[in-house]
């Protein structure tokens, strides 16, 4: 890649609840001359943004359209139930789905969990967003099941949450438009999220390892010997030959006694 081919910046999309801070920090350490631009995008719009070229890569929630996008799963989030702090469920460290059978379970239109059957009792209407559902939980209207990162994102002093056993979970992945080959800067970010070291042979060209002191000394001796041999070849001399060029001793049959 030539200097004119290198993008002036790297655009990274991310959905609410995902925190790219640690990877962004490593990016700035390794590529200080290439700015990284963060773009927050609603989960439902992340795939379209990447497919349309609005970002080089994105931290998104699965599934994605594998006919258009490549993806590397990164981690799976725990599902939690968001409840008022004085709710009876707070007495337990973990909650099961049957524990919510008598609760009104809010189901926002932007829900991220793949439910076959929603637990509890349905609300009269579905909230438009998770943020709206959080407000209803605070008002005592019902409870809400979300990935743990969203419970933290919408934290309120009057609410808390508990892990829910055997509930659907949300998976977070690094995704990018399918191209062949994968762009260099995308390979760089793939290496960062996978924990590759700066000298990894994948992605950016690795810095060659430096020889040890012992290896340097050995190379120096080999170089000296090579230089001496070349000098002798140039002058026509060999060991045991005087400066005039005639051998000092005869070779052949041994001298008689």
Image (cartoon, helix red, strand yellow):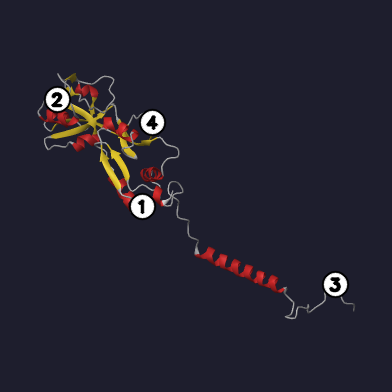
Write down the quadrant of residue 53 in the picture: top left
Q: Earlier in the sequence, mark 2 or mark 4?
A: 4
Instruction: Name the residue located 36 percent from the left edge and 43 percent from the top edge.
Output: 193
Q: How many marks?
A: 4
From the viewer's perspective, tell me whether residue 25 is left or right of residue 204. left
From the viewer's perspective, tell me whether residue 232 is left or right of residue 196. right
Q: Disc 4 designates what residue?
A: 68
- Residue 248 lies, with reference to residue 113, above or below; the image says below
Of badges 4 and 1, the one in the foreground is 4
**Residue 239 marker:** none
Q: Disc 2 designates what residue?
A: 142
Q: Disc 3 designates what residue?
A: 252
Q: Nearer the viewer, residue 22 or 32?
A: 32
Instruction: Name the residue located 36 percent from the left edge and 44 percent from the top edge.
Output: 189
Q: Residues within 10 Å of mark 1 (few under 14, many from 20)?
A: few
Q: Is residue 252 visible?
A: yes
Of badges 3 and 1, the one in the foreground is 1
- Residue 33 lies, with reference to residue 175, above or below; the image says below
Whole-percent x, y for residue 186 in the image = 38, 42
Instruction: Name the residue located 53 percent from the left edge and 65 percent from the top edge.
Output: 216
> For numbered disc 3, what is the local secondary structure?
loop
Q: Earlier in the sequence, mark 2 or mark 3?
A: 2
Of badges 3 and 4, the one in the foreground is 4
Alpha carbon of mark 4 to alpha carbon of mark 1: how far? Answer: 29 Å
Whole-percent x, y for residue 222 in the image = 60, 66
Of badges 2 and 3, the one in the foreground is 3
Alpha carbon of mark 3 to alpha carbon of mark 4: how far? Answer: 82 Å
Q: Disc 1 designates what residue?
A: 30
């Amino acid at each position: 890649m030539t200097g004119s081919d290198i993008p002036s910046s790297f655009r990274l999309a991310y959905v609410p609840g995902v925190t790219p801070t640690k990877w962004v920090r490593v990016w700035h350490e390794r590529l200080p001359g290439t700015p990284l631009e963060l773009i927050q995008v609603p989960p439902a719009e992340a795939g379209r943004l990447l497919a349309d070229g609005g970002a080089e890569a994105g931290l998104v929630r699965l599934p994605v359209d594998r006919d258009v996008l490549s993806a590397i799963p990164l981690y799976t989030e725990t599902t939690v139930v968001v409840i008022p702090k004085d709710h009876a469920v707070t007495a337990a460290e973990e909650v099961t789905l049957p524990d919510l059978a008598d609760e009104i379970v809010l189901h926002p239109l932007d829900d991220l969990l793949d439910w076959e059957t929603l637990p509890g009792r349905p609300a009269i209407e579905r909230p438009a967003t998770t943020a709206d559902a959080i407000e209803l939980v605070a008002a005592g209207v019902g409870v809400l099941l979300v990935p743990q990162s969203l419970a933290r994102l919408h934290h309120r002093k009057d609410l808390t949450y508990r892990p829910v056993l055997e509930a659907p979970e949300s998976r977070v992945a690094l995704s990018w438009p399918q191209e062949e080959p994968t762009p260099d800067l995308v390979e760089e970010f793939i290496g960062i999220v996978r924990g590759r070291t700066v000298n990894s042979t994948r992605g950016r060209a690795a810095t060659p390892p430096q020889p040890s002191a012992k290896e340097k000394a050995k190379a120096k001796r080999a170089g000296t010997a090579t230089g001496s041999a070349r000098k002798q070849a140039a002058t026509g001399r060999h060991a045991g030959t005087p400066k005039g060029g005639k051998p000092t001793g005869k070779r052949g049959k041994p001298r008689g006694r």
